[in-house]
Amino acid sequence: MKFVTTERLQTLKDENADFLLINTLDAEYFEKTKIPGSVNIPQSQNDFVDKVLEATGSKQKMVVTYCANDECNSSTHAAEKLEAAEFNVADYEGGAKAWNDAGQRLEV
C-alpha cells in the first residue's frame, strides 16, 4: 500500500494535481475533519467502491484516503478496499489531526 505524507498532500494540492481526496469517516464526523477540497465517502457503506468510482470516473485517477488521526483505521480499510479493486490509491495516515498540527486549516 502507498502512503502520503502531509508534505506530499500539500504539494499535490498546491500543484492542483488531478486527484480525489476522500474523507472516509461517517457523515457526522466529516464536518469536524474536513480538509479543504475533500469529499466524504464513508468506507462503512456497502457501496463504497462504487461511490468512489462514480466520483473519480476512472480507477486510474489518483485517490487519497484519510480519516481523523493515526489511531483511526478507517482510511487504511478504505485504501485496502480500493487497492483490491485496482484503484490508484494512497492512504494519508495522519489524517485531519496531522493536517491541522502542520498548521493547515480544516474547513469547519
Image: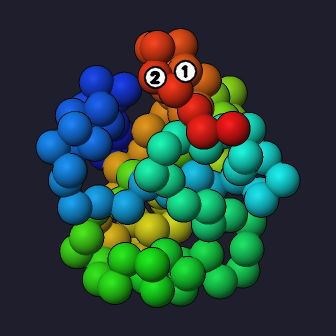
- Residue that appears at 84% across and 53% down: 28
Q: Residues within 10 Å of mark 1 (few under 14, many from 20)?
A: some
The kind of secondary structure element at disc 1 is helix
The quadrant of the rendering that contains the C terminus is: top right
The kind of secondary structure element at disc 2 is loop
- Residue that appears at 43% across and 45% down: 91
Q: Measured from the top left, where is residue 12 in percent x and y? A: 23, 42
Read off the residue under disc 1. Answer: 100
Q: Residues within 10 Å of mark 2 (few under 14, many from 20)?
A: some
Name the kind of residue labelled 1 in the image: Asn
Q: Is residue 3 left or right of residue 104?
A: left
Q: Measured from the top left, where is residue 3 in percent x and y? A: 34, 39
Q: Is residue 18 visible?
A: yes
Task: Check contact, mark 1 vs mark 2: CB within 8 A.
Answer: yes
User: Relative to 36, is 105 above or below?
Assistant: above
Tell me the colour scheme of the image.
Answer: rainbow
> Which mark is drawn over residue 84?
none
Q: Is residue 78 visible?
A: no
- Residue that appears at 49% across and 53% down: 38
Read off the residue under disc 2. Answer: 104
Q: Measured from the top left, where is residue 78 in percent x and y? A: 56, 59
Q: In the current view of this chain or complex, which residue is farthest to the front? A: 108
User: Relative to 79, is 58 above or below?
Assistant: below
